[in-house]
Image (cartoon, rainbow, N blue to C red):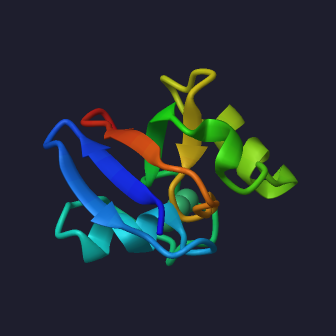
Amino acid sequence: MPTLTIQPSGATTEVAPGTSLLAAILAAGEKLASKCGGEAKCGACHLFVLEGRKSLSRTSGVENEKLDSIVGVGSKSRLACQAKMGEENVTVELLSFV
Ligand code: FES
């Protein structure tokens, strides 16, 4: 199974493909806000994908729309509740400003 590395703590966890990053991060014991129940509505689960971005599920229209409304969004941004693990290792960075 591919490995998810979570910065800044450096925690790692094996994640089954198809699992959302949000579920994997919470299962690893890390904290990540999710105020809308994972429906791409709150933006609280915004994070940066440092490695393995291409292996994640594609960004949907609804995710793009929400990302457009968040301050601090960059080319590495994803919503953890929408991005699902693929077959390759991924490194994400949790953000403190959301
Ligand atoms: S949990 Fe609300 S946008 Fe992801």
Q: Residue at x 29, y 71 (%)?
A: 26
In the image, residue 13 above or below residue 72:
below
Q: Residue at x 28, y 76 (%)?
A: 27
Query: Where does residue 40 sit, x and y in percent of width and height?
Result: 63, 62
Can residue 47 be seen here? yes
Report the side of 12 relative to 19 (left or right).
Answer: left
Q: Residue at x 43, y 53 (%)?
A: 44
Toward which corner of the image does residue 83 lie, by quadrant? bottom right
In the image, residue 34 above or below residue 88:
below
Residue 46 vs residue 91, the one in the foreground? 91
Which residue lies most toward the front here? 1
Query: Where does residue 59 sit, x and y in percent of width and height?
Result: 77, 49
Can residue 69 be seen here? no
Query: Where does residue 21 sit, x and y in percent of width and height?
Result: 48, 62
Residue 48 vs residue 89, the one in the foreground? 89
Q: Residue at x 39, y 57 (%)?
A: 3
Query: Where does residue 67 sit, x and y in percent of width and height?
Result: 65, 39
Report the side of 19 relative to 33 (left or right).
Answer: right
Count of all numbered marks drawn on residues in the image: 0
Toward which corner of the image does residue 68 lie, by quadrant? top right
